[in-house]
Image: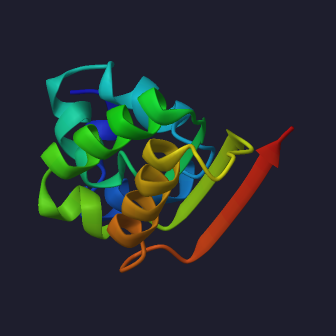
Amino acid sequence: MTPIQWLPVELLYDIICLACCDGGLTACSLRLVSRAWRALTNPYQFRSVSFAGGPQEIQAFLRAFEASNAASRANLRHICLTTTRTNERDVLHRDLLKDLLSTVSPAVETLVFATER
């Protein structure tokens, strides 16, 4: 038995929760360690999310987020989205942004939204 296996699961959850605040990189890395770590990390896979999003990226995130379990969705706290500036004719992009914001709004505490020219 490795030393980390001696820790109570509740303490591991606290450690993982604190570690998964970097935009998703740590959560993704921990999920790849083993099945046990994947199970421990699953509730925090969307804790902190950061991505540059055009319509395809926003759609991919929404599909993954909506397909995840309720615990993963409920633990979303921070989202950083960088997107290109849309014009009024870009209805798809505008509607996807509305869908994204309405989907994540129940749980999100911090939203950073930046547009590029």
Judge by depth and name the residue closer to the eye, 81 or 25: 81
Question: Which of the 4 image quadrants contains residue 76?
Answer: bottom left
At x 54%, y 31%, the residue is: 25
Q: Is residue 115 above or below residue 24?
A: below
At x 70%, y 43%, the residue is: 82
Judge by depth and name the residue closer to the eye, 42 or 87: 87
Outermost residue, right side: 117
Query: Which quadrant of the figure contains the C terminus?
Result: top right
The reply to whether residue 47 is in sight is: no
Q: Is residue 78 above or below residue 68?
A: below
Q: Position of residue 10 (x, y in %)?
A: 27, 65
Q: Position of residue 17 (x, y in %)?
A: 45, 58
Q: Is residue 4 above or below residue 9?
A: above
At x 50%, y 44%, the residue is: 93
Query: Which quadrant of the figure contains the N terminus?
Result: top left
The reply to whether residue 104 is in sight is: yes
In the drawing, does residue 18 fall left or right of residue 100? Answer: right
Q: Position of residue 44 (x, y in %)?
A: 35, 52
